Amino acid sequence: MRGLRVSDKYAKWRTSKDAPAARNGERALSYRDVTKRWYGTAQWKRRRKVQLDAEPLCWMCKRDGRVEVATVADHDPPHRGDRTAFFTGPLKSLCKRHHDSEKALIEAGKAPITIGEDGWPTS
């Protein structure tokens, strides 16, 4: 397969085995396009299943004193487009609610919202 045209920003994770070559007039694949393909691989699906079988409960819910089934195998630390980190880096089990809210805020560098015993935000 031919090499890919890619901006310098994505050069570290973009290889010819990640996607078909961009041709004249076609856009180069984005970070999101490439990582979406990684999530569709049999290797990732097996790895996700092993993680969720080994750690079936959301660790953030357990920390908060709740029991919730984990549905997301989350990269911790984030892979940031590094193929090796994606397929071999450490994972943690999370429920979708924590993955899409609190964990997303933490990765974006924002403080997560904590709720006090009275039901009101504390921060």
Image: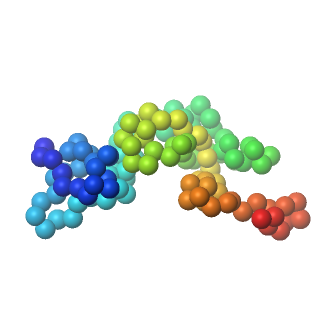
All told, the count of numbered labels is 0
The answer to whether residue 6 shows anywhere in this view is yes
Location of residue 4 in the rendering, given as x and y in whole percent from the top left corner: 18, 51
Q: Please report the residue visible at 66 percent of the width from the left and 44 percent of the height from the top.
A: 58
Which quadrant of the figure contains the N terminus?
top left
Q: Please report the residue visible at 43 percent of the width from the left and 38 percent of the height from the top.
A: 85
Location of residue 104 in the rendering, given as x and y in whole percent from the top left corner: 57, 57
The answer to whether residue 46 shows anywhere in this view is no
Report the side of 23 relative to 116 (left or right). Answer: left
Location of residue 107 in the rendering, given as x and y in whole percent from the top left corner: 56, 54
User: Residue 22 lies in what quarter of the image?
Assistant: bottom left
Residue extending furthest toward the right: 118
Report the side of 41 relative to 121 (left or right). Answer: left
Asked if 75 appears above or below 53 in the picture, the reply is: below
Question: Is residue 122 or residue 100 the one in the foreground?
Answer: 122
Question: Is residue 121 or residue 45 the one in the foreground?
Answer: 121
Asked if 48 appears above or below 120 in the picture, the reply is: above
Q: Please report the residue visible at 88 percent of the width from the left and 60 percent of the height from the top.
A: 117
Which quadrant of the figure contains the C terminus?
bottom right
Asked if 26 appears above or below 69 in the picture, the reply is: below
Q: How is the image coloured?
A: rainbow
Location of residue 79 in the rendering, given as x and y in whole percent from the top left corner: 45, 45
User: Residue 5 lies in what quarter of the image?
Assistant: bottom left
Question: Is residue 61 or residue 15 the one in the foreground?
Answer: 15
Q: Please report the residue visible at 17 percent of the width from the left and 65 percent of the height from the top.
A: 26
Residue extending furthest toward the front: 8
Report the side of 39 relative to 123 (left or right). Answer: left
